[in-house]
Image: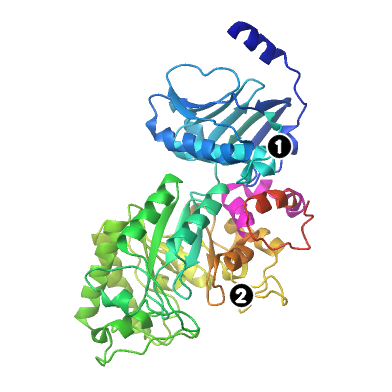
Amino acid sequence: MLILSAVLFSCTPRTPMDLLKESIIPKPASVTATNSSFVLSEKTAIYYQQSSEDLSFSGQYLADILNPSTGFNIRAEATGQNPGKGSIYLTLSDDKSELEKEGYELTITEDLITITAQNPAGIFYGIQTLRQLLPAKIESSSVQEGPWLIATGSIIDKPEYEYRGAMLDVSRHFFKAEDVKQFIDMLAAFKLNALHLHLSDDQGWRIEIKSWPNLTTHGGSTKVDGGEGGFYTQEQYKDIVKYAKERFIIIIPEIDMPGHTNAALASYAELNCDGKARELYTGIEVGFSTLCTDSEITYQFIDDVVRELAELNPGPYIHIGGDESHVTPMEDYIPFINRVQKIVTKYDKKVLGWDEIAHASLEPNATVQYWSKAENATKAVEQGAKVLMSPATKTYLDMQYDSTTRWGQHWAAYIEVDAAYSWDPASLVPGIGKDNILGVESALWTETITNLDELEYMVFPRIVGHAEIGWTKASDRNWDEYKVRLGNQSKRFKAMRINYYPSKLVPWK
């Protein structure tokens, strides 16, 4: 009976499908089609090689995507032998060094789907491509009618940049841990690998620091326009870090300084040069606050904060802010940034900071986040630093799409979907080429963004284009071709319950 079943399975006529016509975002490096199909069925199983327990989460993650919408009971299991027909196989191979850390090879035949990579991250990204090859309704949380067909062929793929991230400002308006996790899942679906959390600003301090408890009990108590604020306990924060790590996303915590510090200044009088605590602030103006850069207690405070953050974060970076410190004289700002960098490196972390920190003497392995002034990014490169590309005119997701957009601002630009996509990090600033660039980061400031629905509307679909900029070679990207692939994502966004902006520039289907 087993032999007969295998024969019948192998002889079942397959629906012809063209892998080249699938709308994959980010666009893969190489696609070859064989014009047939694989049938996902209740008999399908997911296997990962027995010697690679690192793949167990990814296998179960894939099963958890497939089961709710298909109604199947697909399981992920370790195996020490070749899987049977109709299976999905996840395997690591040292022979795939050309794929580097995050690349993968996805091979689909009528009988078997294989995802091969050198590292577990590559397997995870191959899974993201595989889910896009299934009908959009695979993303549904309720059972949908099949069939569940996947076009056959092969995809060989790896990213252009090592850092592909998003920044979420949880200081102006606080987002609960559950919302952050939902956002992480959205980022993971498009192969982003970093989430930068802006944890402190004038309006709120959002991370528990046990050696300075009033930062959250007082400094975290409010938000823009008043009302209840919020903060993450260290246990909640560690849980976010773990959740992200399982999805191959690092968390970068930012404590902005010496400006954007009113929440800290309101919490502890001794952080002010006059020894007087500031009032809590719920407006949206910038540039009026500063730590007392001449006071030793300031540096003890920073040392304690960085020490506790370093213990919470396995990722390599701590972001020190450094932007818009308009009331800190440059003669005070430069030695402050120099000293803070030393504190960060003392705890074995790399420095990240907004482009203004390039005025200081940058530490080895420091990275400058270009958002405003190209000359600052150039100064960073001249010091041997890498640049993280976040130009406000292209990547700031709080910028309105046009003058009719309900949320957001437009001080940098109106950024329609085409403008967000049609630029190349390696040619944006003269003298800053690909070798100088760590990657690309989209940024969402939340002065006007209060909940997850508003966040999604401002983020999607622009961040999908940024994900492609970070992953796909510039020579393989073209707006007219991309907008068609993006338009074909409409049903998928809806199945994922993403509240996206339906730009008129995109042929949504």
| Residue 50, x across and y down, in percent | 40, 24
The total of numbered circles placed on residues is 2
Colour treatment of the image: rainbow
| Residue 117, x across and y down, in percent | 49, 32
- Magenta stretch mostly in which secondary structure? helix
Is 328 colored magenta in this rendering?
no
Disc 2 residue crowd, few under 14, some 14–19, many 20+, Cα 10 Å: many
Residue 152: image quadrant is top right
Q: Are marks 1 and 2 in contact (CB under 8 Å)?
A: no
Q: Residue at x 77, y 57 (%)?
A: 506
Q: For this rendering, which residue is in front, 426 or 348?
A: 348
Q: For this rendering, which residue is in front, 37 or 175?
A: 175
Question: Hey, what amino acid is under mark 1?
Answer: Glu
| Residue 403, x across and y down, in percent | 72, 77
Q: For this rendering, which residue is in front, 258 or 501?
A: 501
Q: Residue at x 40, y 69 (%)?
A: 199
The residue wearing badge 2 is 408
Question: Hey, what amino acid is under mark 2?
Answer: Gly
Disc 1 residue crowd, few under 14, some 14–19, many 20+, Cα 10 Å: few
In this view, 283 is above or below 58: below
| Residue 247, x across and y down, in percent | 46, 46
Residue 320: image quadrant is bottom left
In this view, 307 is above or below 413: above
In the rendered image, is residue 60 in sight? yes
From the viewer's perspective, is 352 left or right of 437?
A: left
Q: Residue at x 50, y 17 (%)?
A: 82
Q: Which residues are magenta?
A: 463-485
The residue wearing badge 1 is 145
